[in-house]
Amino acid sequence: MVNSGFWGKLKKPIMVLAPMADVTDAAFRRIIAKYGKPDVMYTEFVSADGLVMADDEGKAKLKKDLLFSESERPIVAQFFSGKPEMIEKAAQLAVELGFDGIDINMGCPAGPIEKQGAGAALIKNPKRAREIIQAAKRGAGSLPVSVKTRIGWSKNEIETWLPEILAEEPAAVIVHARTRKEMSKVPARWDVVKRAVEIRNELKSETLILGNGDVKDLEDGRAKIKESGVDGAMLGRAIFGNPWLFQERKLEDVPLPERFEVMCEHTETFEKLLGGVKNFALMKKHFKAYVEGFPGAKELRVKLMEADDAVKIKSLLKDFLATSVDNSTR
């Protein structure tokens, strides 16, 4: 029987924020929750092996990736590992930390992850994948367990791969509509996501199916959901520079003063929560995304790339607004 947990209480279609390493960290999630909260939020993926086996300093650093605020609920902790015993212990930790759900990453194509037998490598090892889901459930207790994966390794294997996952009755399966080999180099294949829903229905499974890949915004997500029949969509890259995404505001419609104010708040939150652990340079990808689509954006970005703290960022943005012409309509 499927333990749906909070997933079963959500109104469909379900709109979810994707976990993205060094992007959807505790600081950015807090900003997103404030300015455009999705139905479900995910942490960045975290090494279950590291949480269990690292020294005290290493564990403390990894736990920074598991920071969350009450405003983010329901919040899901995502883990990766090729070892069931590690996933079980990480799931137990997630329970202790107060998470609402646990997700297993079975789609990451990064070489170091796959060498551990984790991430997308599990697509080639269904037996181990099922053991890991079982272990996560043991550790999770009453919390729901979900899986994020791809449609296959080097080819579409949804016909054989998805039934293996569904046999373990996870609360939800998020299907990234590309193979591991395709990475993100080809358009997402939502026709395969549609087939995933059909397979779920044929097997009379109660597991939710969500689609992921090339979802531009909520309108696009709703269209893809309607076309494929999934229960919801997960949005990733569309959140860059636009914490208002789930509020259905386009970045170009947000006045510059407001955009810059939130950008400063994001930067200050990063320093407060993660300053002693993560490099400030990680914020630069956000600066590039926030600062586009207006006269002088390129020049401002160049200056922002050289800044190394929130005080400097705030000063640069303040100066830009003071000297720009007619910025109140931008």
Image (spheres, grey):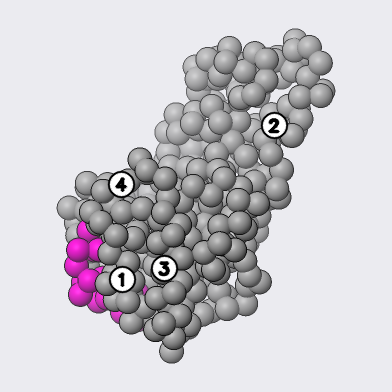
Q: Which stretch is magenta?
A: 121-138
Left or right, 227 with respect to 279, comes to: right
Furthest residue to the bottom? 1
Residue drawn 41% across and 69% down?
A: 196
As measured in the structure, the alpha-carbon distance from the residue carrying label 1 to the one carrying label 3 is 8 Å
- Asked which secondary structure carries label 2, the reply is helix
Residue 328 pos. (x, y %): 82, 23
The residue where tag 1 is placed is: 159
Report the mark closest to the observer, 2 or 3: 3
Kindly indicate whether the residue at mark 4 contacts the one at mark 2 (C-beta within 8 angstroms).
no
- The disc, 2 or 1, on the residue closer to the chain's N-terminal end is 1
Q: What secondary structure predominates along the stretch shown in magenta?
A: helix
Q: Give yes or no for contact between labels 1 and 3 (Cβ–Cβ under 8 Å).
A: yes
Mark 2 or 3 closer to N-term?
A: 3
The CA span between labels 2 and 4 is 31 Å
Q: Are marks 1 and 4 in contact (CB under 8 Å)?
A: no
Question: Which picture quadrant has residue 122?
Answer: bottom left
What residue is shown with label 4? 182
Residue under label 2: 252
Which amino acid, by three-letter code, is at mark 1? Glu
Left or right: 327 as drawn, with respect to 4: right
Residue at (52% x, 67% y) in the render: 230
Does 164 sit above or below residue 115? below
- For disc 3, the marked residue is 195
The stretch drawn in magenta includes residue 172: no
Front position in the image: 135 or 270 = 135
Judged by depth in the image, the label closer to the viewer, 1 or 4, is 1
Q: Amino acid at mark 4?
A: Glu
Residue 136 visible in the shown view = yes
Judge the density around disc 4: few (<14), some (14-19), many (≥20) Cα neighbours within 10 Å.
some
